[in-house]
Amino acid sequence: MPFSPFRLLIYAIIAIALISLIILFVFPLLEEKEDAFKEIETAIEKAEQQEGKAVEQKEILFREGSINTKNFEQKSRLVWFECNSPALCCDKNFECGKGVRWNDRAVFFTQKQKMNVSARCTIEQGLYLCRVYFGTMPAQIEIKELEGLEEKDLSKNQLYEATAKYANIGNIEAFFVKGKAKLYKYAFEENQKKEILIQEKELELNELKAGEAGKASFLFSLSSNGEYKIEARIEAENGGFDIQEMDFNAINSPASACKATQAETTANYNEETKKCEKKYYCTNCNFAFECLAEWNKKMPEKGFELESRNYALEVFEAAEGSCG
């Protein structure tokens, strides 16, 4: 039997009411969840551009439900979750009366609430490893200043000191804090400026409470004039890391005992590189770059390569399969 116009009108009113309810109540929930996902993704993307540094997104609104790390992982990215606010979250892998349960792979919200979210990433073998923190800003190491002389007079002494002043700018205590520094010397090889690693230092430092500052001093021994670079890194097991660099010059070095002595009588053929190699020996050199510099002064036309403190290397093409 065909529907009467009145019955059709009733059905139309009911349909309109249902659509209105969906628009008023369901769509906002979906949009809020989507907004939370976007905020987390934004934090991760920013963190990928600032390795070792936490990026915070404040007061993200979360509805009742769950968020999984799979929503943010890619071929080049792995993600872990952590709730670092005891006031808001249960302990990891446990249920309690608080509004948030969590594990490494998912966070479960039992009620609507706003939370701050931070992300921090490191890179290993081309893969981003990112941790997302729910609750508060995690411990975060920041180097405020790297201090040292712009010019070091080696006639007075040959020790160079660089000091990194740093702080924990996060809201949680930083544990297992370490300081690392590398000393490079600039050298020219084949008309290109290159950095040659000379020395490395590592220090065990004190734990840092939230907002606390510290400093680490690195002492290096210099043996020759030249342009140098120091790269300082302060890190914490749960506090990311920060790196700063500075250049300086060393002048007035006492006469070096490093000397170029003699070369091998014959060159050897390297099966891997398919080139000839001939060693030019040095004596009393502390570093490879010193030996290289001595031979470059003595025979600048050769274009030696850096090898060791005991010899520099001449590399040249084989002539008809022979090194002559």
Image (cartoon, helix red, strand yellow):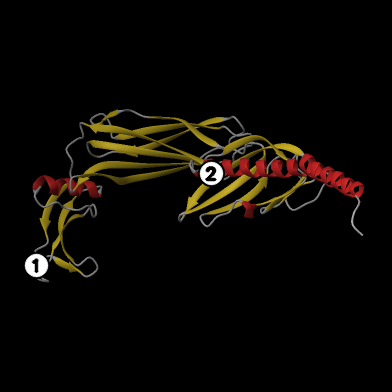
- Residue at image point 74% right, 53% down: 93
| Side of 160 relative to 60 (left or right) | left
Q: Residue 239 location, x and y as percent?
A: 57, 41
Query: Is residue 207 visible in the rendered structure shown here?
Result: no
Vertical arrangement, residue 7 with respect to residue 155, above or below: below
| Side of 161 relative to 88 (left or right) | left
Measured Cα–Cα span from mark 1 to mark 2: 53 Å
Image quarter for residue 117? top right
| Side of 150 relative to 322 (left or right) | right
Identify the disc placed on residue 319: 1
Give 97 or 239, whichever is nearer the viewer: 97
Q: Are marks 1 and 2 in contact (CB under 8 Å)?
A: no
| Quadrant the C terminus occupies | bottom left
Identify the disc placed on residue 45: 2
- Residue at image point 20% right, 31% down: 252
Say which amino acid is labelled 1: Ala
Identify the disc placed on residue 159: none
